[in-house]
Image (spheres, rainbow, N blue to C red):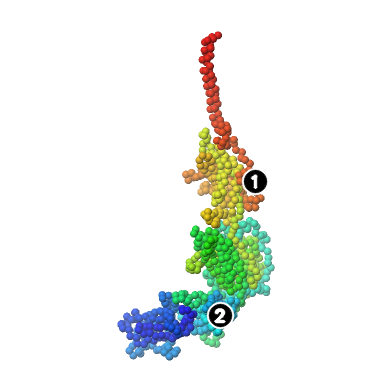
Amino acid sequence: MPRCLTTDPYAHVSFLHRSKTTEIIHSTLNPTWDETLIFDEIEIYGDPQVVAQNPPLVVVELFDNDQVGKDEFLGRTTCSPMVKLNPEVDFSPKLLWYPVMNAGKACGDVLLAAELILREKDGSNLPILPSQRAPNLYMVPQGIRPVVQLTAIEILAWGLRNMKNYQMASVTSPSLIVECGGEMVESVVIKNLKKTPNFPGSVLFMKVLLPKEELYTPSLILKVVDHRQFGRKPIVGQCTIDLLEHFRCDPYATKEDIAPQMKVSLLSAAPRRDVVIEMEDSQPLLTAQLTEKEEEIVDWWSKFYASVGDTEKCGQYIQKGYETLKVYNCELEKVPEFKGLTDFCDTFKLRRGKSEENDDPTVVGEFKGSFRIYPLPDDPTVPPPPRQFCELPDSGPQECIIRIYIARGLDLQPKDNNGLCDPYIKITLGKKVVEDRDHYVPNTVNPIFGRMYELSCYLPQEKDLKISVYDYDMLTRDEKVGETTIDLENRFLSRFGSHCGLPQQYCVSGVNTWRDQLKPTQILQNTARVKGYSLPVLSENGLRINYGGRDYTLDEFEANKKLHEHLGPAEERLALHILRTQGLVPEHVETRTLYSTFQPNISQGKLQMWVDVFPKSLGPPGLPFNITPRKAKKYELRVIIWNTKDVLLDEKSITGEEMSDIYVKGWMPGLEENKQKTDVHYRSLDGEGNFNWRFLFPFDYFPAEQLCTVSKKEHFWSLDSTEFRIPPKLLIQIWDNDKFSLDDYLGFVELDLHNTVIPAKVPEKCTLDMLPESKPINSFKPLKTASLFEQKSMKGWWPCYQEKDGSRVLAGKIEMTVEVLREKDIDERPAGKGRDEPNMNPKLDPPNRPETSFLWFTNPCKTMKFIVWRRFKWVFIGLILLLIVLLFVAVLLYSLPNYLSMKIVNPI
């Protein structure tokens, strides 16, 4: 395609050393020559049979005729002629499409046929020459020419969108020219494209002789002409539609949807008052509202996770009888049953010529419209078929409320050095831009956005909704991850009700509250008019509706289903159930692929989201869904260590006694920085320890997902923390304290706060069989577990164990009180760590430990009394007696010589 939007093409046909040229067709990109070129008396040397097997090629070259300068070469194609050695055989060549190539690129197609006839010397065997349209200009013969039929083409010229400037001037007053099969029709001029981009007269009609075979059907050419000053009418955009089969229809067939375009007029008009169904609003089935507990465990995310099959995160949503939504793994336009949401009108790209030699044609705008092609009767006395585009909506601008729900991102393209990104959302609608930079999600490629944006706009002027994802950077420029664009006009005009999806249940309260402007009974009336049915008739009790010639009852839809307190009136529920059978768009979440302008064909990630479009003429819509990401609630786990019993005695004292200096350590996995331990019970000789010590573990918890959240920085220089979600557990360990070496690990017990093992009331019944992994395979007695979040508090004895040689060994028993408190309970019932103030709820007194519990080198007196004296008492007594005897003997031995000498000197 040259720089201008049209050409003056002609074909230069060569065969061996001979060539001829067709006539020039002016100002078109889709010329129809209808011409036969005849090369007389061409001599080909060789055996005719050999020539028939491998005939010379016919070369067709296309040129653009220029008044000034050299004609521009457009492309070339070749075809092999059909060889007829016996011209008397009645066999004609068949027209076929041949691709036109230029510099290795396809640049069009040519419909042609060629035949090579073996001529006798007198030329008597040659066929009769075809008819002449002009002197020496032969038409295509009847045997080769396609069989044509009078055909009607109805054109719904709805409007023009996103027209770019032409020759540095904006397109202001365009009109549309439609060409096909040598016929042409032009639309009314749009006076002001910015204010009213739709055509005043929307339907055009033309009669064309079209081939009956689809292969030969000519292209449909759309040209947009801008009416400028001084009579200038440049062509500012053009589109060629090659395949017309999609638009063919049977004008007499009874359609399922006889007037799909009526829906728009019904939407844009106020609800009618003289309707068959006119019911007062009634109360829900039960007048209960969401309790505080239900708000914690049921939200929109519960509905979403239940819909994708994530039962761990949906909580009790399904058990309560709530319905799910539809999650599409692609864009809504790509769902086959919704036909691209182009049932009212299609979008055709308008292109313009090249600016450089090897450039591709650029898109300069869009044409909104559709076509209906059907045959006309040959007999003029037969009445023509009914027109297809009968009732059309008002083509004026519609002010609408747009709600954009962005749930989460999937597999976004990393933009940071750590293989992650910090994504946030940017919304562009017309001149409105919402840059949600403050709500970026740090360090993730699967962000949970949970954002809802509400904007107002005028359709069709602001039809293109662009949703972009950017990577947040503090010091450098934010990088675009990708973007996706939604045509809001198609969603507003579509008969599939894509402006607001239909939920499975009609609820007047709770997380599934009805949000559409019209109630199900009103939508059902509009649907009946669209399909050409009589208005639905409701029974007196509201449990039966006659629609489309059939009776529907509420029991056939809600039999064996659990009903909950948020459901609305019966007649509205029944109308909604009927609507769900009409092929309308359900309540959904679509998955849109993000693309980048630098890599247009490579996915940059996906967004799970949906869009609601509400025309303001119908009044205010219902409350939007709250899809805010779940926020963790503050909880506190309080653990009171009372006593231990039967703890392994890990060491021996200096006197040889088996003993342990027992203390208890505890923490919640994922919160290791908050490890806590009791004081030490020294010199436990029988494995018993007394503590009366309190642990306090604050944590953030998601009730609906039953998970704890932990935020940690990957590096000390990281600006943001990375969030992890883990199940809430408590880990308790028993240790033996050593002053001059590492402490000895004795045993542990791990408690899942959602499936906490119910403790034993007395230590004698505390065994390893209480723990789930220790249960025998053939045991029929179920484990006794309970959720600590429901039971709030537990007190008793739990077994601690250690692994030895692949089996568990009882390492001790520990008496604890385990309690989970909510944020308000934490303030109402304060408590301190250990036995610190405020020492209450309950108050912990110092443990009543035996006198033997002390550290030996800090208490020498007690060491002598309770260690040395108690164990070596008789040794000491014996030693003392022996010492007395030895002293007596020593005194005796010392005084005996003196005594004997005195006796000798003084015998008397």
- Residue under label 1: 838
What is the tally of numbered marks visible in this picture?
A: 2
Depicted 605 relative to depicted 714: above or below: below
Q: Position of residue 394 (x, y in %)?
A: 61, 77
Crowd around label 1: few <14 · some 14–19 · many ≥20 (10 Å): few
Depicted 488 relative to depicted 187: above or below: above
Q: In the image, what residue occupies the spot 53% across and 71% down?
A: 340
Please state which of residues 25 and 811 is positioned toward the viewer in this rendering: 25
Q: Image quadrant of residue 722?
A: bottom right
First-in-chain label (1 vs 2):
2
Quick one: SS at disc 2?
A: strand
Q: Position of residue 143 (x, y in %)?
A: 42, 85
Q: Image quadrant of residue 521?
A: bottom right
Q: Does residue 132 appear in the picture of this structure?
A: yes
**What amino acid is labelled 1 in the image?**
Pro
Q: Is residue 572 left or right of residue 70?
A: right
Q: In the image, what residue occupies the spot 58% across and 66% down?
A: 434
- In 3D space, how far apart are the residues under numbered discs 1 and 2 (Cα atoms)? 81 Å
Please state which of residues 868 and 257 is positioned toward the viewer in this rendering: 868
Q: Position of residue 196 (x, y in %)?
A: 59, 77
- Whether residues under marks 1 and 2 lie with C-beta atoms below 8 angstroms apart, the answer is no
- Residue under label 2: 174
The quadrant of the image that shows the C terminus is top right
Q: Position of residue 452 (x, y in %)?
A: 59, 64
